[in-house]
Amino acid sequence: MNSPTPQSSVVIPPSLLSQPFWDDVLQNIPFCISLKKAFPDILQEMQGFIRTAHPFIDFPKYGNLYSNTWEAFPLSIFEGEFINRAHDPQGLNLKQFEQLVDFARNQLPFTSALLGPMEAQGHLRNAFISRLLPGSNIHPHRGWTAEFLRIHLGLVCDPDCQITLDQVSKTWKAGQLLSFLDGGPFLHSVSHRGKHERIVMSVDLRLSYVLQFMPHI
């Protein structure tokens, strides 16, 4: 999926727009601080839910987006993403999608309480849990919206699973945050050459919320 760079209505400082990863700017964002502190409880709740409910479904391929196995389950109704714009190739309609979200949120009360206030204020959208298995690759692509900063919280990690933006590669670490503009100027890809599954919690924070905590940039 090599689509044109989406346009954002938010003016992003050039110093930020030119860097592939935004990890360094997260330390002043209240929600990100809370997310890191909540990691042990999120992990415990999520592992129990995954073990008992087996909620993962194949991530839509949207053409040749990935190879081998990439799975996810939603924690919110998406905004500005492809799933809202067209029929899901798997045949998952909006009502079914909403049912999946409701089921997950009811089974994950701690995580839901963390996400809920931010959703109500319009600051957070597009939350989901994704799992990538060893030997899988997510091919170079960019997201469908430039209105959000994508935040990943590492839950179960493998040092040999890496994400690459603009020839800069990083790996996920349990309890740590990794962030980038999913719909920004850089294509991103993931290669899993490790031995263990990689599970991350992904949330999109609206850029208008993020930038208010960066007055000096």
Image: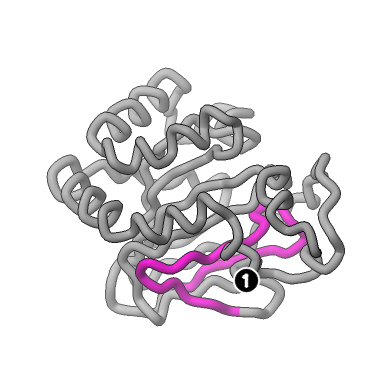
Picture quadrant of residue 124 = top right
Q: Amino acid at mark 1?
A: Asp
Give above or below for 150 relative to 164: above
Query: Residue 111: image x %, image y %?
Result: 33, 43
Task: Please give left or right for residue 22 compared with residue 137 in the image.
Answer: right
Query: Residue 38: image x %, image y %?
Result: 34, 55
- Is 189 contained in the magenta span? yes
Q: Is residue 70 visible?
A: yes
Q: Is residue 143 visible?
A: no
What range is drawn magenta here? 169-191
Report the label total.
Answer: 1
Task: Please give left or right for residue 22 compared with residue 3 in the image.
Answer: left
Give above or below for 193 relative to 95: below
- Residue occupying image coordinates x 44% and y 72%: 172
Task: Please give left or right for residue 174 compared with residue 211 in the image.
Answer: left
- Residue occupying image coordinates x 65% and y 43%: 206
- Residue occupying image coordinates x 39% and y 53%: 130
Give above or below for 31 relative to 120: below
Give above or below for 5 relative to 208: below
Residue closest to the far top: 95
- Is 206 contained in the magenta span? no
Query: Residue 182: image x %, image y %?
Result: 64, 54
Q: Which residue is mark 1?
A: 24
